[in-house]
Amino acid sequence: MKTDIYQRVTDKIITDLENGVLAWIKPWSADNMEGRIVKPLRHNGEAYSGINILMLWGAAFEQGFVSPTWMTFKQAKQLGANVRKGERGNAVVYANTITRTEEQEDGSEAIREIPFMKAYTVFNVEQIEGLPKSYYEKPEAVIDPEKRIAHAETFFAKTGAELRHGGNRAFYSGGRDFVQMPFFESFKSPESYYATLAHEITHWTNHASRLDRDFGRKQWGDEGYAREELVAELGAAFLCADLGLTPEPSADHAAYIQSWLRVLKNDKRAIFSAAAYAQKAADYIHGLQADLEVAA
């Protein structure tokens, strides 16, 4: 690629963090989608995943877009529409591997998989004229903020995670394999409760019997700890979007931002890796749902 997409995306997120903006939360406090939060969508309604979610959430907030739907110039043209003159697109990335057969020293052949990533440009439907009316419709708000949210209750219950309530701390105990949560009534909103639970359930997936995620953590606050917290933060954001929930920044974010900045400044691929691990965790949790239909 002509530009280093890893560095480009990482620099943008570092700038946001230094300004106190979390790309995975800020759009939600800007009345995005008038109360209903969804992942960015492709032109065919399929949700983006991983790092592309963060990139497009950030772009939507920065440019004030309400619609979650994005498409390429060519896709818009195929629908009989056109991107308005002067509109600037936003980058998303496509990752895959290519296989290559290589001759070994002993004369045998081995197949080697080589990862690659390329960027391409998409436009929000609000930058496009002439699309079918369905692309411009806004979904209705679905959350009653005064009550427990039934589909979220069912969703987290179906993970099978041991959940304990009480005290004033939320955490996942890896040694004893349970999630500790303060009582529901102690949160200022139902969304805050479920967002916190989503964060801790994402931590729960790192157990050796599940996804066995290990960043070499040795003590609280080290780089491995910061990487795991970033995965849990993004995993919670992805799950909340899937469940149509609108979380708010927690009191821990200010403290975490500095540790995340250290990681991102030292490794331009860290946010891509964290988003991939978070997506894997979210997919794992969804895989525990059986026939549960999730509002998305």
Image (spheres, rainbow, N blue to C red):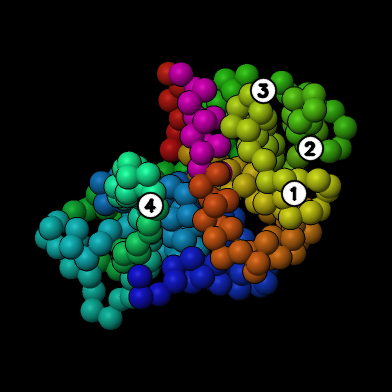
Report how far apart the C-alphas of labels 1 and 4 lie in the structure: 29 Å
Mark carried by residue 225? 1
Q: Position of residue 262 (x, y in %)?
A: 71, 65
Does residue 50 lie above or below 16 as drawn?
above
Question: Which residue position is annotated with label 3?
Answer: 161
User: What amino acid is at disc 4?
Assistant: Ile
Q: Nearer the viewer, mark 1 or mark 4?
A: 4
Question: Which residue position is annotated with label 4?
Answer: 114
13 sits left or right of 82 in the view: right
Residue 60 lies in magenta, yes or no?
no
Q: Secondary structure at mark 4?
A: strand
Q: Which circle's residue, 2 or 1, is located before the other in the chain? A: 2
Closest to the observer, 203 or 72? 203
Mark 1, residues whose alpha carbon is within 10 Å: few (<14), some, or many (≥20)? Answer: some
* Image quarter (top left, top right, bottom left or bottom right) of the C terminus: top left
Q: Secondary structure at mark 3?
A: loop
Mark carried by residue 116? none
Mark count: 4
Q: Which circle's residue, 1 or 4, is located before the other in the chain? A: 4
The residue depicted at 81 percent of the width and 45 percent of the height is 218
Question: Which residue position is annotated with label 2?
Answer: 170
Report how far apart the C-alphas of labels 2 and 4 lie in the structure: 40 Å
Report how far apart the C-alphas of labels 3 and 2 lie in the structure: 14 Å
The residue depicted at 78 percent of the width and 36 percent of the height is 171
